[in-house]
Image: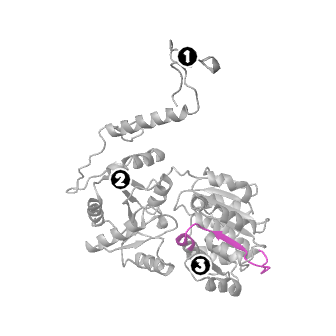
Amino acid sequence: MFNTLDLHECLQRGLQKLAFDAATEVQEKAVPLGLQGRDLMVSAQTGSGKTFAFLIPVLQRLLTTPDTRQGTRALILAPTRELAQQIRQDCLAIGSYTQLQFGLITGGEKIPVQRALITKKNPEIVIATPGRLLDLLRQDVINLAALEVLVLDEADRMLDMGFRDAVLEITGKCNPQRQTFLFSATLGHRGVRAVENELLNAPEKITLSTSRDASEAVRLQRILVDDHAHKVAVCAALLDRPEQEKAIIFCNKRETTEQLSADLQRADRRAIALHGELTQVQRREVLRKYRRGIVNTLVATDVAARGLDVEGITLVINFDVPRNARDFIHRIGRTGRGGEEGVAATLVSHAQWNDFAGIERYLGRRAEERVLEGLEAAFKGPKKLKASGKAVGKKNKKTRAAADKNRQRHRVKKNLGKRRKPAAGAVKAPQGPSASPDSPWKRSR
């Protein structure tokens, strides 16, 4: 496909260097429209080649149109530092034969250094996370008035992380005549729909998958577990399999990543933790060791669920069931990439059975049950299941008593301020001055 496009010579050389002979489906559909100058809204699976689907049109435009040098020419927004760094690496790879400069603006770095990057080098393309970019915009360090192309990558994730106001403030300072690309796991995301008209101009919509589509190359497995110590033992056993090159273990909390990585290290496993509380320098060092194979197991929070593209990841372990199905999809998307097979094993305890059943229902897929010999769980799964796959709950006496008490409170609150109706046959108290002083209805003082 790329040979049939009239691409700039420097861009063609970059593609040849990367040995890009065949385009992926998202590239086949998005690149020609992007080259025409159309705004795009694209939904495609993780690992489908989305980054090059927008980088090729962006670089082509900058290489074939005059450079006014009035400010940043292209801006790529990403929700996490890791994804922003990965995009910059892809820019350097595909743009290696161009004279274009690529600037990275993320949190965790010194602001004076980033201010100098913008003011002195004036890079044509800036890859940034919203928070830090907004800081520089408010300081009038960066100028987006002449911006030619805006890209919002993983827009749904950006909005889920609370960046909506920041994104709208940033785009409000951009050239309104720009070309805009929006890439998201799903175009039906509520936050994406809410900002569509504010960000794009008559966009062409490309939907190649929905957020319910997990990679067909990934085998989903469920392993029943009892407690933290049992989970650690299961992880160690899975990592000992000879077919495992690299693995990622996902946890919901930073504290769990640190504890689990320490537990695995004590068990002589080459593991290291990655989470949002590490400095930028520490994050880079962790990923360097992981990519080079100095360690082969990354224990991470969801900061590694998007934008982390490392070859040889054959196993993803969900130490904790993720909080929602979208996070699950992006976690398992770290394996099974590039046509390779991968395994995603989720450790499910009694407390997390219903959470995982909800994810299975959302995906429309059932995970296969896996049991490791010698590490069988005492928990064998719920005795009764609903049609949804969730456990049938049982209310104990305390639960029923609490429910009855809440209903009683509701009735009392509902009747506050209302006069009670007398029961049938009851004697009504006389009213007014006609009541006798000796009446039994006389109130005591």
Residue drawn where x is 42% and y is 61% of the image:
252
Chain part drawn in magenta: 65-84
Instruction: Name the magenta segment's main secondary structure.
Output: loop
Where residue 298 appears, as percent x and y from the top left, is 39, 70
Mark 3, other Cα within 10 Å: few <14 / some 14–19 / many ≥20: some
Q: How is the image coloured?
A: one colour
Of circles 3 and 2, which is in front? Answer: 2
Nearer-N-terminus badge (3/2) = 3
Mark 1 or mark 3, which is nearer the start of the sequence? 3
| Residue 428, disc | 1
Q: Amino acid at mark 3?
A: Leu
| Label disc, if present, on residue 92 of the rendered structure | 3
Residue in the image at 77% along x and 74% along y = 65
Mark 2 or mark 1, which has the lower sequence index? 2
Left or right: residue 100 compared with residue 382: right
Q: CA distance from mark 3 to mark 2?
A: 37 Å
User: For the residue marked with disc 1, what is the amino acid?
Assistant: Lys
Camera-side residue: 405 or 128? 405
Amino acid type for the residue under numbered disc 2: Gln
Cβ atoms at labels 3 and 1 below 8 Å apart: no
**Residue shown at 46%/79% (left/top)?**
282
Label 2 sits on residue: 221
Q: Horizontally, is 395 left or right of 331 in the view?
A: left
Separation (CA) of disc 2 from disc 1:
72 Å
**Residue 97: x, y in percent?**
63, 81
Q: Position of residue 87 (x, y in %)?
A: 58, 72
Q: Nearer the viewer, residue 49 or 202?
A: 202
Q: Secondary structure at mark 3?
A: helix
